[in-house]
Image (cartoon, rainbow, N blue to C red):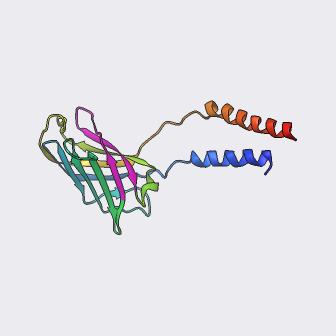
Amino acid sequence: MTFKSTILAAAALLLAGLAPAQATTVTDSSAEVMLYAGDIIAESYAPASDTAGFDPVYALVSGGVFGFDPAFVLSLEDASGEVIYGETDSYLFDGDATLSFVFDITGSAASYFGSALNLSFLFDDTVTDPFSDLTDIYSTATMVISPVTVSNVPLPAGLPLLVSGFAAIAFLRRRRA
């Protein structure tokens, strides 16, 4: 393999690794959410995907802040069974009406989202933090599942390091020859 083909192969691998997962969003405007004594059970019986070929039929979020490891789990199913399983130990509450989780996911449908997804419950009315106040809430909410957006790392910062590494290899090869 020549030096030139080595550089082209490395560049192709680098660019392939930067390709994003397919951007899919799943929504349900009538997810049932039960928050009680620091625990959550939320179910969606009619999740709708905006991506052809991905047709979830059921979503479940369960867990809580006391005694669960991991704290929260996500199961997303289609007609064949569970296609996404996710875990997280944290949540984000905006102080008004949005409760969000970022799940690390696995499963046959993970390619639609990448390695993590954001799940948010948007309540119609203002609610208090259900996990710090241990508030009981029985409500419907709009559930939105979407890929986690990650800001790009600037390539120019790594490019000089890559080029200098290849230059050092070329220098050593030329010096030995």
What residue is rendered at 68% in x and 36% in y? 162
Q: Is residue 43 above or below residue 150?
A: below
1 or 149: which is nearer to us?
A: 1
Furthest toward the right, the residue is 177
Q: Pick the quarter of the image with the C terminus.
A: top right
The x, y position of residue 122, in whole percent, is: 26, 43
Q: Is residue 108 left or right of residue 101?
A: right
Furthest toward the front, the residue is 176
In terms of secondary structure, what is the magenta stretch mainly? strand
Report the number of numbered marks: 0
Q: Is residue 161 above or below residue 43?
A: above
The answer to whether residue 133 is magenta is no
133 or 120: which is nearer to us?
A: 133
Stretch of the chain drawn in magenta: 84-106
Q: Is residue 177 left or right of residue 144?
A: right
The x, y position of residue 36, in whole percent, is: 13, 45
What residue is rendered at 40% in x and 58% in y? 107
Q: Is residue 157 left or right of residue 90?
A: right
What residue is rendered at 22% in x and 52% in y? 42
Task: Please tell me in which quadrant of the rendered image residue 129 appears.
Answer: top left
The answer to whether residue 87 is magenta is yes
The x, y position of residue 131, in whole percent, is: 19, 38
The x, y position of residue 9, in whole percent, is: 70, 49
What residue is rendered at 19% in x and 42% in y? 66
